[in-house]
Image (cartoon, grey):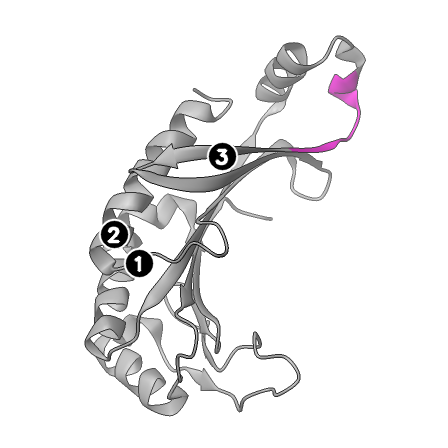
Amino acid sequence: MKQEEKQIVLFFKRGTMIESPQLAAKLNEKFPALLDPIVLPVNEKDLSQPLVIFNRGIFSLTISLTDMSIIYKADKHKEYFNTVVEIIECLEELDYSFERLGYLSTIFHDRKDKEKFVKNMFKENKLIDTDFNLSWYSRELIDSVAVNVWQKEITDPTSQNDLVTVFDINTPKGEAYNISSEFVNSFIKKCDKYIESHDLKA
């Protein structure tokens, strides 16, 4: 059964050199709950392919030449978020820096929420019993940062949920920021407040 998830993606500054064996060893030493990593060679044909994978511990963490991605269950958000910030601090201490940030939040809804969504969005209530995949975009200001926000409303027959909502919030390409651990700590909390106020359960 699929579960609600949070994903945080941090994009390295251009030209960053990733010392994957040393980085994996440092993270493994400092964060033993991640368990043992998998270290892979560079894929010259696709630089976005992972170099370091932690997928046996408390959450999934992958590092490529372009970004670091962390995925965990949404119900563990409060428990794990401090660890995420500490991981970013660890990379800062190793002189790694980030310039863009993406944050995805997946929320499951029951039939009552689906009915509410259909009633508010469509003239035809018969869509309550049909499948759809809708998304819309807005440019928002969150924590004094102009961001892209995609909201998706999807019926997913495989999830045992009547409606799946996905919020995809990211800083725009071409607009580099100093994405520090302090920034992430504040920004993600503001994003959570935005999501809470715009979700169907609000």
Task: Determine whether label 1 and label 2 are within 8 Å by CB.
Answer: yes
**Crowd band around label 1 with a 10 angstrom C-alpha radius: few (<14), some (14–19), many (20+):** some
Whole-angstrom CA distance, mark 3 to mark 2, is: 19 Å
Q: Nearer the viewer, residue 187 or 78?
A: 187
Answer whether residue 170 is magenta in the image: no
| Residue at position x 49%, y 41% in the image | 148
- Identify the element where label 2 is drawn: helix
197 displayed left or right of 107: left
What residue would you read off at disc 2? 183
| Residue at position x 24%, y 45% in the image | 186
Task: Determine whether label 1 and label 3 are within 8 Å by CB.
Answer: no
Going from N to C along the chain, the mark reached first, 3 or 2, is 3
What residue would you read off at disc 3? 139
- Identify the element where label 1 is drawn: loop
Magenta range is 127-135
What residue would you read off at disc 1? 179
Give the residue type that dot 3 points to: Arg
| Residue at position x 24%, y 59% in the image | 181
Give the residue type that dot 2 points to: Phe
Determine the image quadrant of residue 141: top left
Whole-angstrom CA distance, mark 1 to mark 2, is: 6 Å
Give the residue type that dot 1 points to: Ile
| Residue at position x 56%, y 74% in the image | 48
Whole-angstrom CA distance, mark 1 to mark 3, is: 19 Å
**Crowd band around label 2 with a 10 angstrom C-alpha radius: few (<14), some (14–19), many (20+):** few
Task: Determine whether label 3 and label 2 are within 8 Å by CB.
Answer: no
Determine the image quadrant of residue 36: bottom left
